[in-house]
């Protein structure tokens, strides 16, 4: 027969393994999303949406919705 202390230690180790498996399942469901991307107008590589210049070809990116100049009030 197995001594009680050894059986208790084995049971505790098994509970730890089950808890670790549950932790890995939870972290797998909350993965970090990739940053929003856009295509460079010159080299067509995927770059970050807010990048002012392409890190690959150094071309300046243009906004699809440029700011409109403010109207002067009379």
Image: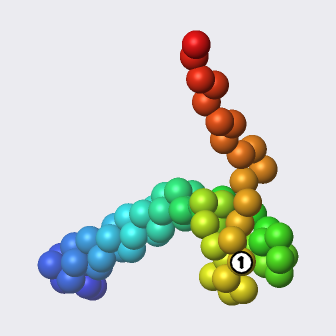
The picture places residue 42, in percent across and down from the top left corner, at 83, 77
Residue sitting at 25 percent across and 84 percent down? 2
The picture places residue 18, in percent across and down from the top left corner, at 42, 67
33 vs 64, left or right, is: left
Q: Is residue 18 visible?
A: no
Task: Determine the secondary structure under disc 1.
Answer: loop
- Of 11 and 18, which appears nearest the observer? 18
Residue sitting at 57 percent across and 16 percent down? 73
Q: Which residue is mark 1?
A: 59
Asked which colour scheme the image uses, the reply is rainbow
Residue most toward the top?
A: 74
Residue sitting at 69 percent across and 71 percent down? 60
The picture places residue 23, in percent across and down from the top left corner, at 42, 63
Q: How many marks?
A: 1
- Of 3 and 67, which appears nearest the observer? 67
Residue most toward the left?
A: 5
In which quarter of the view is residue 65 placed?
Answer: top right
């Amino acid at each position: 027969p197995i001594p009680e202390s050894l059986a208790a230690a084995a049971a505790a180790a098994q509970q730890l393994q089950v808890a670790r498996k549950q932790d890995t399942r939870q972290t797998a469901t909350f993965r970090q999303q990739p940053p929003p991307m856009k295509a460079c107008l010159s080299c067509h590589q995927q770059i970050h949406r807010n990048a002012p210049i392409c890190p690959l070809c150094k071309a300046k990116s243009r906004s699809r919705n440029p700011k409109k100049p403010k109207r002067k009030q009379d």
